[in-house]
Image (cartoon, rainbow, N blue to C red):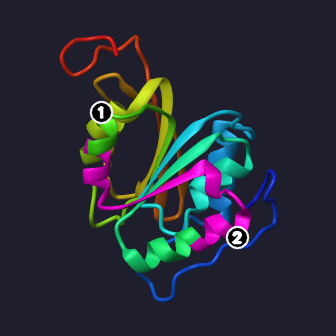
Amino acid sequence: MRIIAGSARGRRLAVPRGDAVRPTADRVRETIFNVLGQWLDGERVLDLYAGTGSLGLEALSRGAAHAVFVERDRDTAAVLSQNIRALGFGPATTVLLQPADRALRRLAGEEKFTLVFADAPYAAATVASLLVPVAAVLRTGGRAVLEHGRREAVPEREGALVRWDERRFGDTVASFYRLDPVFPGPAGEIP
């Protein structure tokens, strides 16, 4: 596993032993960033279920200003921290060692992101359960990329969060959402 483009292009990432982590494959990440745009200058990124940190680190390599990584497993978070240090992105990162749902509740009152990645274990979370809390941490116009299994049905929209693209890779699907102020929020408000 490696960083595909940007300042850390070609650098390899450490991966935890065992099968507890399912890193996003290079081909999937390349497509995700082709859809999002090659350069992410100044973006504020949230990487939920971060694992190795491949999505957030790729975003930093492509110019994102800051990334918050959320990982609940202590051993996996140690590998993530190792990857952050190896790439020299320490000052531009925050690592939260806690479950994603708790981190989303905490972050909803603290800061807003322009880009959110969520690659939850397919059996542990559903896209539908993530949409409302993810919308709460996004800035207006912000984007979210949620990876899920191909058998999971995902909504076209939830409040002001609207799906604008979807890409399939065998059993993996990447659904792209945008927080769109044209659509009313959960209480009929414009976010």
Q: Quadrant of the N terminus?
A: bottom right
Residue 83 in magenta? yes
Find out whether the residues at labels 1 and 2 contact each other: C-beta distance under 8 Å.
no
Residue 78 appearing in the image: yes
Residue 86 image-quadrant placement: bottom right
Between 95 and 140, the residue placed more toward the observer is 95
Q: Would you say 107 lies left or right of 51 here?
A: left
Residue 132 found in image quarter? top left
Q: Which residue is mark 1?
A: 109
The residue beneath circle 2 is: 86
Q: Residue visible at 45% across and 25% down?
A: 139
Q: Residues within 10 Å of mark 1 (few under 14, many from 20)?
A: few
Q: Earlier in the sequence, mark 1 or mark 2?
A: 2
Number of disc labels: 2
Magenta segment's dominant SS is helix
Q: At 34% across and 16% down in the image, what residue appears?
A: 191
Q: Nearer the viewer, residue 95 or 115?
A: 95
State how far apart marks 1 and 2 are (Cα): 31 Å
SS type, badge 1 = loop
Amino acid type indicated by mark 2: Ala
- Three-letter amino acid code at the position of disc 1: Gly
Classify 172 as above or below 130: below
Residue at 63% across / 70% down in the picture? 83
Q: Which mark is residue 140?
A: none
Q: Which residues are magenta?
A: 82-105
Q: Residue furthest left?
A: 187
For residue 157: magenta?
A: no
Which residue lies most toward the bottom here? 18
Where residue 108 appears, as percent x and y from the top left, is 31, 35
| Residue 130 or residue 48, whichever sits in front | 48
